[in-house]
Amino acid sequence: MARKSILAFAAVGLLAAAGMVATALALGRFDGRLDPVLDALKGADAPDPGPLPALKLVDAFPKLRFDLPLWFGHDGTGSGWLYVVEQDGRIWRFRPEAETKELFLDLSTVVPERRRRHNEEGLLALAFHPKFKENRHFYVNYSQLKGTRPRRGVLSRFTASKDGQPTDPATEKVILEVEQPWGNHNGCSLNFGADGFLYASFGDGGAANDPHNHSQNLATLLGTVLRLDIDREENGKPYAVPRDNPFVGKDGARPEIWAYGLRNIWRMAFDAETGLLWGGDVGQNAFEEIDIIVKGGNYGWNRREGFAPFQNGEKAADMIDPVVDYPRDKGISVTGGVVYRGKVMEKLRGVYLYADYGSGRLWGVEYDHQEKKVKQHELLLHVRNAAISSFGEDPAGEVYVCGHHSGRIWRLEAEK
Ligand SMILES: [Ca+2]
C-alpha cells in the first residue's frame, strides 16, 4: 500500500504515523453544522512576517455548495460562466452572483461510485479548448474500472451544447487511455499551453516506491507530463504528437512525453506572463515539492524526493531539483497552485501560490526566473482543515481554492 495518497483522504492513520493531528480528515464531509474554518483556526500557525501579505479565505459563493469539489475555473470566452468539477462526476456552472448552479456535464454514472473507487479516483480534471467559443470542445480526465478492461485513466473530449442544456454525454470522444495498475497516483492535471497543445499529468501508477520504475521509464506514459496536439489526428490515433516534443524519434521512448521522473503531479498551471509551467509533485516519505516543468525534464522520482535522495537513489546528472520543497511536519500532500496575475493584491503579483491538502498551510513563492532563484518563500495562511484540493482563477485572475470537505469555493484575499 502507498505510504500516503496524493489527495490523502483516507490517510488519517498515516497522518498519525507522521506525527500529525488528523483534525481535517476526521471531519469528513461538510454536514451543514460544523464550521470548519472557525474550528481550524485553533492552533494554526501564524503567517510568516515577510514582505508577502497574509491571506484569508472568503466564502466566494455563499449560496452554493459542492460535493467533493476538485476544480474551479472559467471557460476563457468572456461568457461570465464559472465552473466547478465534483469528484463523483458532475461539472456545474454558475454566474458569480447567482444563487443556483446548473449542470454542465454529468458523468456520475460513468465514473465509478464512491464506495467502489479509490479515494484518488473519480472525475479529476477539466480544460477548455482555447477555441471553446467556436468549437465548444472541452477535455476531462476520469477514472474507469468498468468493463473487462483494466483499471485506467481516460482523457476524453466532449462538445458542449449551445442552448444552455447540459452536455450530451454521447459527444464523448476518447483521446487517450492510460492503464493504472493501482488506484492511487492517477494525476491528473489538464492545461492548454500558449502553443495550443494540451499538457496532461499522469502519476507513477500507484502503490509505494514506484515498484516498476515507471517514472524513470520513457516507454510508459506513467510518471510524466504529456504534450498532445488534440487538433490533429495521426497514425490512427485521435491526437498527434507535436514534432518538437523532446523524445520524438528516440528509440523505446513514447513521443507524447514532455517531462518525466514525476511521482504524481496534482495540479499544474501555466504562468501567462512568463510561460513557465508550475506543478506540485506529491511526495511519499519525507518531502513535497514544487517543480517548474521544462521540455524533456527529468524530476528525479523514484531516485529523488524533493532535494534529497530517495532510498539511497543516485542523482543522475540530468535530474532537475524542485524550486522549493517542504518536509513532513509541514504537510503530507501538496496541491499545486497558480501564479497570481490578478489586480486586487498588488504585492502578490507574480507570486506562485500553493498549499498542502492535509495540513491546510498555504505558501507563496516569489521566484526570479532569469536568475533561477527563490526570492521569498512564505507561509501566507494556515487553516487546518481547509482540505484545499485545487486552485483556480476567475477571468480577472483573482484566485480561488476548493474546500474538498466543506464543499466551499473560497476566494483568497489579503488580510489587510
Ligand atoms: Ca522530484
Image: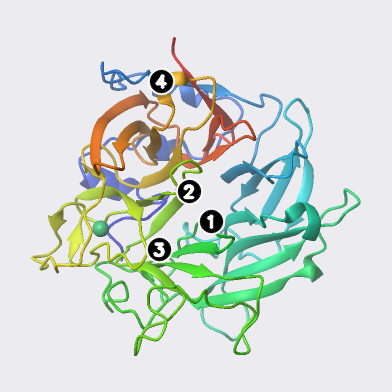
- Image position, residue 285 (x, y; %): 21, 54
Give the labeled residue for mark 2: 270
Mark 3 or 4: in front is: 4
Q: Which mark is residue 185?
A: 3
Which of marks 2 and 1 precedes in the sequence?
A: 1
Which of marks 3 and 1 precedes in the sequence?
A: 3
Q: Given contact means CB atoms under 8 Å apart, are the residues at marks 1 and 2 in contact?
A: yes
Which of marks 4 and 3 precedes in the sequence?
A: 3
Q: CA distance from mark 1 to mark 4?
A: 26 Å
Residue 415 visible to an observer of this rendering: yes
Instruction: Find numbered disc 1 in the image and state the secondary structure of the residue it sits on.
Output: loop
Give the labeled residue for mark 1: 193
Categorize mark 4 by other alpha carbons within 10 Å: few (<14), some (14-19), many (20+).
few
Instruction: Find numbered disc 4 in the image and state the secondary structure of the residue it sits on.
Output: helix
Instruction: Find numbered disc 2 in the image and state the secondary structure of the residue it sits on.
Output: strand
Which of marks 4 and 1 precedes in the sequence?
A: 1
